[in-house]
Image (spheres, helix red, strand yellow):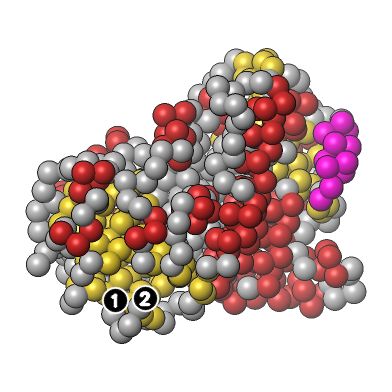
């Protein structure tokens, strides 16, 4: 199958019943965020993922532009997992007229119940702040979507267990979720349509990591979409937590605070795993460990309630911890598998304000992971200007985010409307990434028994996608194509 020339989707998608079967890349093409892939066949439309664009302003503005396809004409939607860049546009889609069912795993439904209302709240708060302080060109500024839109979106979610093909309508097409090992509930979506198998990779997890299982192998697909986030690099080797232990210890010795901006779902769990392990092995001092994110606290409870979906060794250890801590208060016991000795969950704004004001040496985990919003901004404002403190980033930092600026060595940063000098130590550990690196992607591809007729690379910046394409071509000799934004490709007849 030849991918054919890219064409503007707005010119193509206006005549649904006249177009041949095809795929249109409405997001996560040429960039990491905004995953949306439109599959058209037999006069029907299926949207796989419905993510927000994040990072650079030019990308975020795409969230406000009308989709090149009328949302009311989309028959079904499939979510691979609950990260905002894969599900965060759903309330906007519903507000614009989408009324179909949204297929996802049960854990993805659970996590969306945290992520989407929180995102709506932030959208509404941003609009209120813009109107209150007058920094808007629009009168009045409006949120991208509202809490009502988020609630309506959640009502459309239909959970489906792993490895159970279900029809999207009638008898075909079908979708089957396969565990991707990237996040609780994350999956590849295998769609069978007109005798073809199309595998939407979502985000690919990693091998041999704590908390989550390895990504499941897949034997074959006619069409494959695979992420390329880290397609041009390898993650740091697993050092059994040595670097994290060093950062914690050095910060404590300076009498400072360690601030860890973290993605609220998925990353917090691995950070806590390592802190608990290092503390149990007496490799770091016993410090107060605060999780200052209501969403992260809710996600911890979902992780703790679904231990059977996590890494087998971690589940066994967690069962032991839970049996030893049955006398604890219910609130703490729900997250006991992740709790260090002096573990504290911060729920109320007043508790968060008290923690920000405290100068006690401690570890604070707060969202968002790229420092684009959330409570972590106030923690950064209170700590960045002191050499005693450390800011540790533990995940991908998209271009245009504060996290990228800080990890690139910015000497000052704008937070909450004012500039702050950066005197704190800024560190980064990539080994905790939940995205497969180049070698891990190639390892997963080696499980295929035959080459797909075409492999499309998505969810990556240009350099990463180009490097991965070259490696797939050289090592596996597969046809591969780097998807372009709004490009449409035809499926084989």
What residue is shown at x 75% (from left), y 32% (from top)?
Answer: 379
Report the Cα–Cα distance between label 1 and label 2: 6 Å
Across and down, in percent, residue 38 comes to: 31, 56
Q: Is residue 348 magenta?
A: yes
Circle 1 SS class: loop
Q: Is residue 333 left or right of residue 375?
A: right
Circle 2 SS class: loop
Q: Which residue is mark 2?
A: 168
Furthest-bottom residue in this view: 171
Q: Is residue 253 magenta?
A: no
Tell me where the magenta segment starts and ends, as one range.
347-358
Local packing at callout 2 (Cα closer than 10 Å; few below 14, some 14-19, many 20+) is many
What is the number of callouts on the image? 2
What residue is shown at x 57% (from left), y 46% (from top)?
Answer: 145
Residue 296's label in the rendered image is: none
Mark 1 vs 2: CB contact within 8 A:
yes
Q: Quadrant of residue 315?
A: bottom right
Residue 173's label in the rendered image is: 1
Q: Quadrant of residue 389?
A: top right
Q: Can the viewer see residue 281 in this picture?
A: no
Q: Can the viewer see residue 290 in this picture?
A: yes
Q: Is residue 217 left or right of residue 114?
A: left
Q: Does 470 sit above or below residue 107?
A: above
């Amino acid at each position: 199958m030849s991918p054919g020339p890219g064409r503007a989707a707005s010119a193509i998608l206006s005549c649904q019943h006249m177009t041949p079967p095809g795929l249109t890349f409405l997001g996560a093409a040429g960039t990491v965020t905004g995953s949306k892939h439109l599959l058209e066949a037999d006069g029907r439309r299926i949207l796989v993922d419905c993510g927000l664009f994040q990072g650079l302003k030019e990308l975020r503005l795409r969230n406000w532009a009308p989709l090149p396809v009328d949302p009311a004409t989309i028959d079904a939607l499939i979510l691979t997992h609950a990260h905002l860049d894969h599900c965060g546009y759903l309330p906007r889609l519903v507000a614009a007229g989408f009324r179909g069912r949204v297929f996802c795993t049960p854990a993805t439904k659970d996590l969306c119940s945290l992520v989407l209302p929180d995102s709506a709240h932030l959208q509404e708060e941003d609009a209120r702040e813009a109107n209150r302080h007058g920094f808007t060109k629009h009168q009045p500024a409006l949120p991208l979507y509202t809490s009502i839109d988020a609630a309506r979106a959640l009502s459309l979610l239909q959970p489906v267990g792993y490895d159970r093909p279900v029809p999207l309508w009638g008898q075909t097409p079908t979708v089957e979720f396969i565990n991707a090992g990237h996040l609780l509930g994350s999956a590849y979506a295998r769609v069978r349509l007109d005798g073809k198998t199309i595998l939407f990779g979502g985000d690919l997890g990693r091998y041999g990591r704590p908390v989550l299982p390895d990504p499941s192998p897949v034997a074959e697909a006619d069409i494959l979409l695979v992420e390329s986030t880290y397609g041009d690099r390898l993650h740091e080797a697993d050092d059994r937590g040595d670097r994290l232990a060093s950062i914690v210890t050095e910060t404590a010795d300076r009498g400072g605070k360690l601030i860890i901006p973290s993605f609220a779902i998925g990353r917090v769990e691995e950070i806590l795993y390592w802190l608990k392990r290092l503390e149990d092995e007496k490799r770091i001092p016993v410090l107060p460990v605060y999780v200052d994110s209501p969403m992260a606290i809710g996600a911890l409870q979902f992780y703790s309630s679904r231990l059977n979906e996590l890494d087998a060794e971690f589940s066994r250890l967690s069962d032991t911890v839970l049996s030893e801590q049955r006398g604890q208060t219910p609130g703490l016991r729900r997250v006991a598998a992740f709790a260090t000795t002096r573990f504290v969950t911060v729920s109320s704004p007043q508790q968060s304000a008290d923690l920000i004001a405290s100068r006690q040496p401690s570890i604070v985990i707060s969202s968002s992971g790229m420092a684009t919003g959330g409570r972590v901004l106030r923690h950064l404002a209170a700590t960045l200007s002191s050499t005693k403190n450390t800011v540790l980033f533990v995940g991908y930092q998209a271009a245009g985010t504060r996290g990228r600026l800080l990890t690139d060595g910015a000497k000052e940063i704008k937070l909450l409307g004012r500039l702050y000098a950066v005197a704190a130590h800024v560190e980064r550990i990539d080994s905790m990434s939940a995205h497969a690196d180049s070698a891990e992607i190639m390892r997963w591809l080696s499980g295929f028994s035959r080459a797909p007729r075409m492999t499309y690379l998505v969810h990556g910046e240009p350099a990463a996608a180009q490097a991965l394409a070259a490696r797939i071509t050289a090592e596996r000799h597969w046809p591969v194509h780097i998807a372009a934004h709004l490009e449409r490709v035809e499926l084989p007849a």
